[in-house]
Amino acid sequence: MLMEFLPGIWQSDLISGIPDVFHAFSDRRVGDMRRSDMRSSFADACGISPDAFVLHEQVHGTAVYPVGSGPAPTAGYDASVYRYQQTGANGKTGHLPVLTVSAADCIPLLLVDPAARIIAAAHSGWRGTLSRIASRTVNEMEKLGADVSRIYAVLGPHIGVCCYNVTSRRARAFEKAFAGVAGVVENRGGRDFVRMQAAVTATLQQAGVPESNMEVSQMCTSCNAEYFYSYRRDRTASYGKMFGIITIRT
């Protein structure tokens, strides 16, 4: 489960004990991560430099950017992967980027293969979930040398099936894309609700990530107004963005 290790900052029990791996999810008490001053405060609390954040425009697409492989896609991207290489006689790595994903209802997905020192961060909204951005991200990690059986995946706070009411058309799209996956769509009182986490975890399992290597936050961003921004709930009134971050410290 996710535990609050600092005010407004959460970590997963699953990967918090892995040596050298640092990750965190912010909530609204830390501030809107679209603001540079709030990002700096969050970075300071986490003991990292805000200059290390890999910032990018998320476009609800399927592009996965291997950080450091060349220029980032000019049209934006929704997932990034990175492999840390040891260089020099002292065995230290050089550039130490912190991968980021911002969300306010969509699923912030963090992944790591600790043995291969490969990390990833993905933004899985409804479009990305239908397009299986989770498995696309895993595939890019494998291209860098990750072993899928060693990959850990954490799904941060997101809108739950309790609140994610969708149109009939979108519900049918999820039923078609995830046929055979229990609980992806619920009908209550003639209204359709989508359980995004079921779709994403099924996608990860189909890609080969062991179920025992996954952790899913049960905190709904829409229900918990004290802690989380929610686009669905707030729209433009008090809408903000929260961060999921992951890096490897050496």
Image: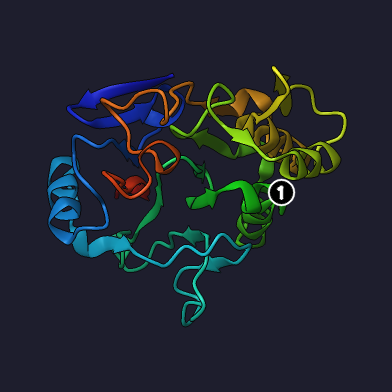
Q: Residue at x 49, y 72 (%)?
A: 76
Residue at 56 percent of width and 59 percent of height: 60
235 w.r.t. 212: above or below: below
- The quadrant the N terminus occupies is top left
Q: Is residue 113 visible?
A: no
Q: Is residue 20 left or right of residue 164?
A: left
Q: Write the residue at 60% across / 66% down.
A: 63
State the count of labels: 1
Q: Position of residue 75 (x, y in %)?
A: 52, 78
Q: Amino acid at mark 1?
A: Leu
Percent across and percent down for residue 42 are: 18, 45
Q: Which residue is mark 1?
A: 130
Residue 140 against residue 155 in the figure, above or below: below
Report the residue at 44% width, 73% height from top: 68
Please name whichever residue, 248 or 217, is drawn nearer the observer in this view of the structure: 217
In the image, is 25 to the left or to the right of 157? Answer: left
> Please, is residue 178 above or below residue 195 in the view?
below
Q: Position of residue 183 (x, y in %)?
A: 73, 22
